[in-house]
Amino acid sequence: MTSRTPRDSRLRLVRPRPLAAAPRAVAQGRSRRPAPRPPEGTPPPAELAGMARARLAGAARVARWADSSLGPGRDGATSDGKGTLSVTTAERAAADLGLTDAQVRADWDTARLSGLVEVHGDIARPGWRLRAWNRDDSAVLRGWVALFDAWSLAYPEPADREHAAVAEVVSAMPQVLSFLQLSAGPVPVEQLLDLLDQRVTELRTERCEIDYVPPVAPHPYEEQLRATPVAAGTAVAQSLAQEPAEDTPLAPLLDWALDALASVGALTCADGQATLTPLGSWAVWVKLEQICVAAQSPAGNIEQNAEGMLRGCAGLRPNAARAEYRAWLAARPVGSAVTELLDAARGEDALLRGLAFEALRVVGAPAESDVRAAADETTLRPYALIWLAEQEGTDPEDAHEVLTREEATWLWVDTAAAVADHGEAPLLVRHLESAVQATVPALLDEVRAVGHPRTVQVLVALAAAHPDPALAKAVRRAAFQVHTGGS
């Protein structure tokens, strides 16, 4: 006679493990490309780090002052969500450090942009780079590169220029910087202006836009030219052609861009020529190398949109995928890249959702405001909350603890959907270990209640994959109940 005693041991889960990002297939080993060497004449990393420390010395001093003098729980910044120092704090720092109020604010802004200070809402705290400042050259260099990437924020943009024109120049400057780096020496500003004009024209052509011509006063010969026959108006036309052309409107914006890059230590300008500093040359070379690696790799996703890039990275090992993310990001303005990644995460493919947030981890702090806004969307909320927790310093192994039980269950179903679509049956079975519930019956009860649109498909796939007949039967029953709306 067969025993009817319930076999609870088969329906019990092992000790829960932290929820991981959406899993991906394990790719075959790739041939390793030898580490590229920087151009001849590039200082060694230790010397570059010394230059970066010198450039960021004021920012580091203000960050250390804030760390020691303000302490947790005290008011140091305004509540505008941008980490702006309050008047009282700026005055106190100026008195303690022997600086002016303007110097304190400038150094504070530099500390934020370089990651020495991290701002979360209306709270600012020391960044991890400040802790490693004296002992870790790579942390120092990454901090300076973060400032270099944010050059357009480090220097006020011209108030009399349209934001669209400023954005075009910011998008075009990587090509100008690449030309400077490849030239390996001083380049006349007039030559850079020609290159900038060509690149802006290309950007407008890609958007099928007509070139912008600023309004000018009517020419004194304009009416005469319109009313005069062609033959008779030749002399007038020649006089128009001989009029000195007005300076291109891009010239002041190029001056602003060069001044901004000089303010962060990326280049110098003198005698009508611009020259990259050793730090600037090294940083541009690193970005060019990242782009070349991606373009030459089997994946080669740099020209893809965000969704295509993520699909191309789905089969890569984590380190290789992160290299692709960095190259893809290096070729795009940060703002538009973050928008693309979040749009890809909103799609139906749960695997792309997880990979998009892996790419956003490479972006880091510049993506925080967009990710914080995305936390209001049900589909993205668990991923966004974990991402924000990690940005605030939570250990990645413990970041899942910020989720409510319902959010954790929703994430479990979503990652299970990624495994079901792209993984193998054993992976789906092992995915049970990441559930927060202690037993399968408890998991199934909460999965039915969470309302994920892929619940039925996930449960059916799990039932087909699991080798335990009793557990598979319980999972199939739960799938049927969700499908029919039963309880």
Image (cartoon, rainbow, N blue to C red):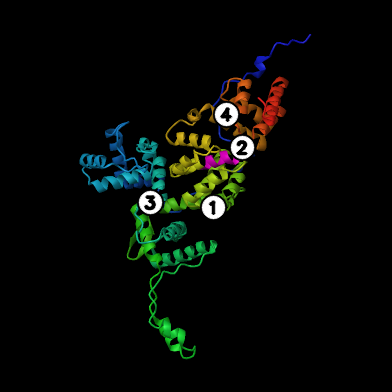
Q: Position of residue 109 (x, y in %)?
A: 33, 46
Residue type (three-letter) at the residue carrying disc 3: Leu
Q: Closer to us: mark 1 or mark 4?
A: 4
Q: Earlier in the sequence, mark 1 or mark 2?
A: 2
Location of mark 2 (residue): 24
From the image, which quarter does the C terminus lie in?
top right
Q: How many marks?
A: 4
Residue corresponding to mark 4: 409
Amino acid identity at mark 1: Cys
| Proximity of marks 1 and 2: CB atoms separated by less than 8 Å | no
Q: CA distance from mark 4 to mark 3?
A: 40 Å
Q: Which residue is mark 3?
A: 153
Mark 1 → mark 2, Cα distance in angstroms: 25 Å
In the picture, measured across the screen, residue 68 lies left or right of residue 45, that is left
The answer to which of marks 3 and 1 sits earlier in the sequence is 3
Q: Which residues are magenta?
A: 350-359
Per the image, label 1 sits on a secondary structure element best described as helix
Q: Secondary structure at mark 2?
A: loop
Q: Amino acid at mark 4?
A: Thr
Q: Which residue is mark 1?
A: 292
Q: Nearer the viewer, residue 77 or 137?
A: 77
Element assignment for label 3: helix
Mark 2 residue crowding within 10 angstroms, few (<14) / some (14–19) / many (20+): many
Image disc number at residue 109: none
Q: Is residue 205 left or right of residue 173?
A: right
Within 10 Å of the Cα at label 4, are there few (<14), some (14-19), or many (20+) other Cα atoms?
many
Residue 392 in view, yes or no: yes
The vertical placement of 382 against 236, above or below, is above
